Amino acid sequence: MTKEKFNAYRKVQFSGATNMWDVKTVIDLSDDALTKEDCLDIMQNYRAYEEQFGEFVEDLPYLQ
């Protein structure tokens, strides 16, 4: 997993635009930066990636 993919997932998550279990919509909202396999991997390893890549996501409006 890359930081860019994890951040793409988190951006969709923080947008509140969809239920994160709706993987097809997550992929669409990530501008196809993510695959189904990426989403499932992130769901299974979320805490580890959060620790690895940091707690905050870059470029989110409320973090600027």
Image (tube, rainbow, N blue to C red):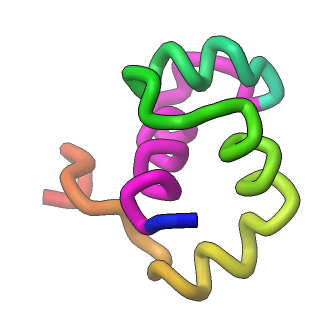
Q: Residue furthest right?
A: 44
The image quarter containing residue 24 is top right
Residue 26 located left or right of residue 12: right
Residue sitting at the far bottom: 52
Q: Which residue sits at x=79%, y=67%?
A: 45
Instruction: Say if 55 sits above or below 38 in the image.
Output: below
How many tags in the picture? 0
Which part of the image, by quadrant, shows the C terminus?
A: bottom left
Residue sitting at 48 percent across and 76 percent down?
Answer: 55
Residue drawn at the location 72% of the way across and 55% of the way down: 42
Q: Is residue 54 above or below residue 24?
A: below
**Highlighted magenta segment, given as a residue range:** 3-20
Residue 32: percent from left, percent from top: 45, 24
- Residue 14 belongs to the span the image colors magenta: yes
Q: Is residue 22 above or below residue 45?
A: above
Q: Position of residue 18 (x, y in %)?
A: 63, 18
Q: Residue at x 75, y 41 (%)?
A: 37
**Percent x, y of residue 38:** 67, 46
Q: Quadrant of the N terminus?
A: bottom right
Q: Is residue 15 left or right of residue 49?
A: left
Q: Quadrant of residue 31?
A: top left
Magenta stretch holds residue 27: no
Q: Position of residue 17 (x, y in %)?
A: 53, 18
- Mostly what secondary structure, the magenta segment? helix
The answer to whether 55 is drawn above or below residue 25 in the figure is: below
In the depicted view, which residue is nearer to us: 57 or 5? 5
